[in-house]
């Protein structure tokens, strides 16, 4: 596997290929990332991953500085998974000057849920993803890029960006990988202490219970069920931002018969100082 730090080196390593399979990450890789590499691998003629902790998607009070950076271990895992090129740019390489041109996702998708609780988050994500896409795919007929469904809204934001800008890139959504107790794998799980770690699976259990209750209830009961689910987590010491049932198509609240619609239950809550997110399609 080639490890490159500049856009020029990346493009040089990719010259001669036609269809990169790309897995962008912020590093500190876990089995969820490796599953994405495995999924993307057979779909391109070269497999590329990036590791870049993107300052643009962190608010000033968030964990940009403490975000785990484990490049050597990550490189070993990627190589073992069959990745051909790892692009690990320094900040000055991707942002040699302040990034004043940014992608602003449509507010109906980008300003709800995660975008509401983390204002600017999807602007930061979309901007860096477009820039990474331009580093990897410039001059290529097309390619595929894989993102994890744990960041459900992120996948939708990226898909819509690709569609609106007519980028020749197919977006794959990889299933969320979970620990034995159901906790969705995430780099931020490493922040949890032992007691928090044993509590953390309650988030996926709360989403599952809310999904089951929602399927059996009339739509006008959903706000009450959601409020009760949040209160139940709060009684256990969590600080929930949202637990909510949405349509998979557009993340809007469902109307009509809940049982007939493809839905997803999404949640975000803080446990101690760690904010966890998860979702379940129902
Ligand atoms: O999901 C992530 O790790 C990041 O949001 C991404 C897509 C790599 C952009 O920085």
Image (tube, grey):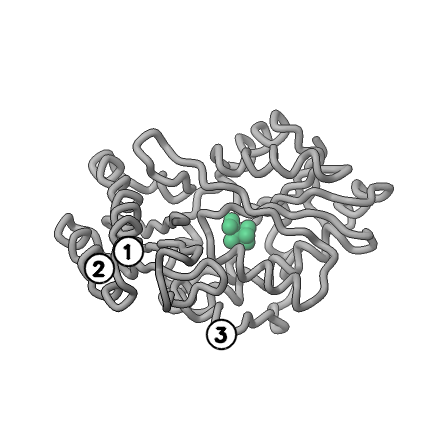
Position of residue 53 measured from the top left corner of the image (x, y, whole percent): 52, 51
The image quadrant of residue 111 is: bottom left
Circle 3 SS class:
helix
**Residue of label 2:** 225
| Residue 102 placement, left or right of 44 | left
**Residue of label 1:** 214
Circle 1 SS class:
helix
What crowding class fits label 1: few (fewer than 14 Cα within 10 Å), some (14-19), or many (20 or more)? many
Q: Residue at x 27, y 43 (%)?
A: 205
Instruction: Tell me the distance, in whole angstroms, between the alpha carbons under discs 3 and 2.
Output: 26 Å
Circle 2 SS class:
helix
**Residue of label 3:** 107
Comparing 25 with 156, the one in front is 156
The image quadrant of residue 234 is: bottom left
Q: Residue at x 57, y 49 (%)?
A: 52
- Of all residues, the one furthest to the right in this rendering is 16
Position of residue 144 measured from the top left corner of the image (x, y, whole percent): 69, 47
* Tag 3 near tag 2, CB within 8 Å: no
């Amino acid at each position: 596997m080639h490890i490159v730090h500049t856009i020029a080196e990346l493009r040089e390593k990719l010259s001669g290929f036609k269809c990169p399979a790309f897995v962008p990450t912020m590093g500190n890789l876990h089995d969820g990332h490796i599953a994405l590499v495995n999924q993307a691998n057979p779909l391109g003629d070269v497999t590329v991953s990036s590791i870049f902790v993107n300052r643009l998607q962190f608010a000033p009070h968030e964990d940009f500085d403490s975000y785990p950076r484990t490049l050597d271990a990550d490189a070993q895992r990627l190589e073992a998974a069959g990745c051909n090129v790892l692009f690990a740019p320094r900040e000055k390489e991707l942002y040699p000057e302040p990034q004043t041109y940014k992608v602003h996702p449509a507010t109906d998708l980008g300003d709800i849920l995660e975008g509401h609780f983390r204002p600017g988050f999807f602007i930061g994500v979309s901007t860096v993803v477009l820039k990474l896409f331009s580093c990897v795919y410039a001059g290529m007929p097309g390619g595929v890029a894989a993102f994890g469904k744990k960041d459900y809204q992120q996948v939708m934001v990226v898909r819509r960006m690709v569609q609106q800008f007519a980028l020749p890139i197919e977006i794959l959504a990889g299933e969320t990988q979970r620990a034995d107790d159901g906790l969705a794998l995430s780099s931020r799980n490493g922040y949890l202490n032992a007691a928090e770690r044993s509590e953390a699976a309650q988030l996926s259990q709360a989403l599952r219970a809310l999904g089951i209750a929602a399927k059996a209830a009339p739509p006008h009961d959903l706000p009450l069920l959601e409020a009760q689910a949040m209160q139940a987590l709060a009684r256990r010491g969590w600080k929930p931002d949202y637990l909510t049932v949405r349509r998979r198509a557009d993340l809007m609240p469902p109307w009509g018969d809940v049982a007939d619609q493809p839905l997803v239950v999404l949640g975000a809550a803080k446990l101690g100082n760690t904010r966890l997110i998860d979702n379940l399609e129902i």
